[in-house]
Image (spheres, helix red, strand yellow):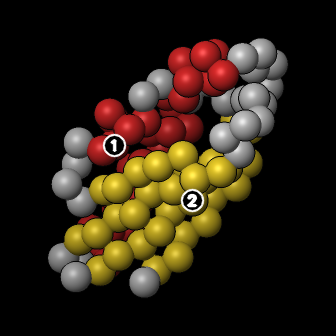
């Protein structure tokens, strides 16, 4: 079993309320948490309106599958979130 921790830091320019922040993040728990190989949580910047940090723990039978799923998460997040990805880090366990 292979595992990777994927952490993404996002900027949400012009975000004026926590309600707007939740709307702009667009239900990441529901979207990515459905996959049994992925655990997701907002891991930082919870109280800042114009920033958000999300961590995904991705597991799989091969490192290639885990890397592929991490890349898919990155691409979907960049396409669907009304914000800008500032930093992406991966830590292989």
- Residue at x-position 46% and y-position 80%: 92
Q: What is the x, y in percent for residue 45?
A: 71, 45
Q: Which image quadrant: the N terminus?
A: bottom left
**Which one is in front, 35 or 47?**
47
User: How crowded is the residue under tag 1: few (<14 C-alpha within 10 Å), some, or many (20+)?
Assistant: some
Q: Quadrant of residue 29?
A: top left
**Which one is in front, 31 or 75?**
31
- Residue at x-position 54% and y-position 46%: 42
Q: What is the x, y in percent for residue 59?
A: 29, 69
Answer whether labels 1 and 2 touch (C-beta < 8 Å).
no
Of the two numbered discs 1 and 2 on the same chain, state the one appearing first in sequence.
2
Residue closest to the far right = 14
Q: Is any part of residue 71 visible from this angle?
A: no
The residue carrying mark 2 is: 7
The residue carrying mark 1 is: 32
- Residue at x-position 47% and y-position 24%: 26
User: How crowded is the residue under tag 2: few (<14 C-alpha within 10 Å), some, or many (20+)?
Assistant: many
Q: Is residue 30 left or right of residue 84?
A: left
| Cα–Cα gap, marks 1 and 2 | 14 Å
């Amino acid at each position: 079993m292979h595992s990777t921790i994927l952490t993404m830091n996002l900027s949400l320019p012009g975000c004026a309320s926590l309600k707007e922040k939740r709307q702009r993040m667009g239900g990441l728990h529901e979207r990515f948490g459905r996959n049994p190989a992925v655990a997701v949580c907002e891991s930082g910047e919870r109280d800042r309106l114009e920033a958000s940090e999300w961590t995904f723990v991705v597991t799989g039978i091969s490192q290639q599958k885990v890397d592929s799923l991490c890349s898919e998460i990155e691409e979907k997040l960049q396409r669907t979130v009304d914000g800008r990805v500032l930093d992406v880090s991966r830590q292989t366990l």
